[in-house]
Amino acid sequence: MTFSKEGFKQFLHDRGHTGNTINSYVSGVNQASHHGEQVVWSISDVAALQQIIADFDHGGAYEEIGLRGNNVVINALKRWAEYVESVPAENLTKSYLLTWNPANAKEGGSDQVVVGTDIQWSCHSSQPQVGDTIYIMQLGQNPRGIVAKGTVSQTSFVAPYWADTNKTWRYIKVDIDEVRRTCGDGLLPLLLLERFNDKQNKPFRWTPITSGVEVPQSLATELNTQWQAGRDVHSLRQFIEWTQQDEVNSRSEWLPKFKERLGEIQQLKQSATPIGDDMLEWLWAPPYNGICSVMPGVLPKEAFEKQKVFLRDVAESIRTSPSAETHQSVFKTWKAAVTQGAFAKTYEVVINRVFSAFAAEQYSTIVGPANCKKVLKCLQQEFTLDVLLPDDWPTQNAWIFTGLQEAGVNMTKVAENNVAIWQLFEALSARSKEAKIQTDFSEEAEEKDSPMPTVHSAPLNQIYFGPPGTGKTFITMEAAVRAADPSARWKNRDELKVKYKALADAGRIVFVTFHQSYSYEDFVEGLTASSDSGKIQYAPKNGVFKKLVQKAKDNQHTGQQAISTSFERCWELFLEQLSGNAEGVTITTRRSTFLITEVDDNTIRFDKSSGDSVHSLSVSTLQAVFNQQRVIKGGLQPYYESLISHIKALGEQQNTAAVERQNFVLVIDEINRGNISRIFGELITLIEPSKRLGGNEPLEVVLPLTGDKFAVPDNLYIIGTMNTADRSLAGLDLALRRRFDFIEMPPQPELLAEVFVENIDLELMLKTINDRISVLLDKDHCIGHASFMHLHPDHRPVKAPETASLAELAQVFQHKVLPLLQEYFFEDWQRIAWVLNDQNKVPESAFIRKAAGKPIAELFKGVSQIKARDRWEINQDAFDSVESYQLIYQDETVAQ
C-alpha cells in the first residue's frame, strides 16, 4: 500500500474521531506542508517525520505555527506519524524505475512496451519483490518520461543477455497494466518529474545509469497521484496544470499581484483616459512591476524622467494595438531615438514587458527572445508539439500559445498560464543550471564584455562572537543572505528564512560545524575507501571547502561560457549519454577502446577491450585533470585523457551558456571548537582578501594529496560563529584572528527596556545578573537576551496572550538561565547564589539556598575525617514568586 490523505482520513475514522476532528487534522497537515515547505502527505520515513514534529514543537523552527490554538498542527503531525507507523513495513509496496531506450533496442530485446503479463525486463537490482510497482522510463530519444506502469510478477533471475547471448544478465518479470507511448496519450514528462524533486527536496536521478532503481517513498506517492491524473491528458497540459495546483510552483506570492495588475490594465484599455504618470512609471521604470523582472536590463531612472513624452506615446500605441506590426514599429522608432542620443540603447526586454502587460493573453512574461526560444525548443523536442523556432519575439510567443492550445490547456486562465510558462522556463534553467535572467545577451554585448568589478559590500571573512543567546544564529543567517545575494530584501524573519533556504538549496550557502574531530580531510580533500569485486580501493574525495571553491570559480565572472569549458556541464551530458545506452559508452584511445559501464558519485567503472577484469577511474581526479589542476602520469593517463576529450566533444556540440556572477557563502558554526591549523592547513593564507583570485596578489598552492592547483576566488565569503562561553577568544589561533573581521555580539538588555512581567523589570534584572557574572567570571560567560525576547510584547508567539505570565518567566529561569549558571560555575552553588543575590533574601525567596539535613556525625557514624561542608538545594517555590526575581536587582529593604 501507499500512504494518502484518504487513507489518513479512514485511519482516523476507524479510531472513532468525528468528522470535524478529522477535517481539523487534515487542515493541520496541510498547514505543516505549507509552512515547512515539504509535502507531509508524501513522507513515510519515521525519522523524517519525527524531525518535522520537532521543527513544529517547542524550540523548533516553526514553533509558532505548531502550537497555535490547541496545538492543531503538532497534534495532526503526531496522528500522521501514528498512521504511518500503523502499517507494518512488510505491507508496504515499493516502486522501481526500469529504463527503456528504443534507439538501442534490438530484435529479441525490449523493443516493445505493451500491455501484458510476465514480460521479461532487464533489472540491475535484485531487490524488487512480487507485487511491487514498476514504472518504465523512456530514455535516449524524445519524448523522455514514464511510458508504462505495472507490477512485478517474478523476482530477480539470471538469463542470457538479450543483445549478446554469450553473456548473462539480470532480469525480472512484470505485468504491464498501462502504456502511454506519446505525449498525447499522457506520457509523464521528465521535466515534470524533475519538479517533483524540487518540491520534495529529494536529489533523485530520474535518468538512472542502471535499470531497477528504487523510487523514494515520498516521490513514489507523488508519482502515483500524477500517473492517475494524467491519463489521456497531454504531457504539456499535465505540466501546466500540476504547476497551477502545486502550493509552491503556483507562485502564490506573485500570482495575486499579476492578476491585480492585469485588472488595472483591462480598466485602462476600456477607458478613453490617457495613461497617467503613475501607470507610465509602473510600465517602464521598476526592475520588477508585478508582471515580471527585467533585471539587469532595467531602464535608467534618468532616461525615464527625461523621455516621458516619448515613452507615453509608445505606451499609447501599444495600448491601442499590441500587434506584431506595432512591435516592429516601436523598435524602429526607438532605434532612431538611440541614434539621436535620447537613450543609450534599445531596452528590448523593457519594451517587451509593456507588450506583455497590455496583452497577457498574447505575450508571455518571458521577455527575452533567447529564453523564449529555449521554451519553444522544449515544446518541440520534449513535448513533440509542431511549433517553429522563429527569432522575433512576437512570433515566438504566438507559437508558445499555439503549443499550449494544441495540448488542451485552458486558455481562459491568462495569468495562471503565464506563471506556468515562466515555471517551465525556470525548470529548464534549473536543469541546465543557467542564470534565470531576462536580458538577451546579444543585446547586452557591452555589459557582457565588461569585467565584473571586485566590490565587497561585506568582509570576505568575518566571525560573530559572543555568549549564548545573543542572536548570533539570526545575524549569521542575515549576513549569509546579504553576502550571497546583496539585492535580497525581506520584511520579517520568516521571509529571511525562505530566502536563506532557497540559497542553501541552490548550493550557494553551505553550513558546516567544526568540532574536535573535524579535519583537513573533511574540509579540503582526503581519501575514501570502496570495495570493488572484493578488493579495497582508495580514491581522492573532495571536502566541503574544495567543492564550494570550485562552484564559486565557475560563477566568478558574468558572460557567455562555452559548455566545453565546464566540467559539470560536460559531465552531465556524458551521464545523460550513458543513461541512454544500456551496454555502456565506448571511448576511443590512441591505440584501442574501452567501455564505460557504470558511474557513481566517486567512481567510473570500465572494461578494457581485452581482459575480463573491471577497472576504475576517479571522478574527482577526472575533474581535476579537466580543469588543469592536476597532471596524470602512468598507466591510467590514456584513459583519463581520452574520456576528457570525449566529454569536451559533447560540450562543443552545445550552444554557449549565459553565466552570471554569483556569490557563495560558507557558514562555519562553532569555528573555535576545531583545530584551525589542522583543518585549513596550507590554505589559511589563501583566504586573505588580497590573496584571492581577483585580489591584488592572487596566490595558488599545490595540494599535497592530489597535486591539484588550488586558489580561492573573491566571490566566496566565509562567516563563522563563536560561542565565547565555550572557549575564550584569547585562545583562538592567531593566524585565524589576523585574517578575519571579528564582530562582537554582546547581550543587549536594553532590548528589554520597559518590559515588565508582573512588575519584574526584565532589563534591570538581566543587566544586574550579567554585571555580577562579569565580576565573578568574565564578560564571555554572560546570559543572552534572546532567551527573554518572547516575553516582549512586540515579539509574542502567535496566539499567545499579549502579556507574558510569571509562569513563562519561570520556564526561562528553570530551563535556560539556571542550567547555564551551573555550567559556567561548575556547580559552585555559592557563587550561583551570589549572582542571583540569594544571600540577601529570606530562604523562602531564594532560588539557591542551603539545604537542611542530618548532621555529618549522624550520616557517617564513627568517621571523623570528613569535614562539614555546605549542602545546597534549588527552591522550586521561588520560581513562582515575584519577589524572588525583584530581589535579584533590589535590596530586600527596598522591596519591602
Image: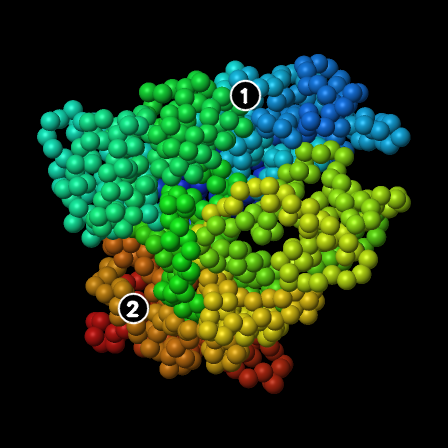
Question: Residue flagged by tag 2: what amino acid is it?
Answer: Pro
Label annotation for residue 280:
none
Image-quadrant location for residue 875: bottom left
Name the side, left or right, on which 52 lies relative to 126.
left
From the top left corner, tell me how far across and down residue 883 is, in percent.
Answer: 27, 66
| Number of marks in the rendered image | 2
User: Looking at the picture, does residue 624 appear above or below residue 411?
Assistant: below
**Residue 197 visible in the picture:** yes
The residue at 46%/73% (across/down) is 696
What residue is shown with label 1? Answer: 183
Name the side, left or right, on which 411 lies relative to 662.
left
From the top left corner, tell me how far across and down residue 878 is, in percent.
Answer: 35, 64
The quadrant the C terminus occupies is: bottom left
The residue at 69%/54% (across/down) is 622
The residue at 68%/22% (across/down) is 151
Q: Nearer the viewer, residue 374 or 41?
A: 374
Q: Residues within 10 Å of mark 1 (few under 14, many from 20)?
A: many
Q: Residues within 10 Å of mark 2 (few under 14, many from 20)?
A: many
Name the side, left or right, on which 496 lies relative to 9.
left
What residue is shown with label 2? Answer: 749
User: Looking at the picture, does residue 594 appear above or below residue 767?
Assistant: above
Q: Nearer the viewer, residue 764 or 889?
A: 764
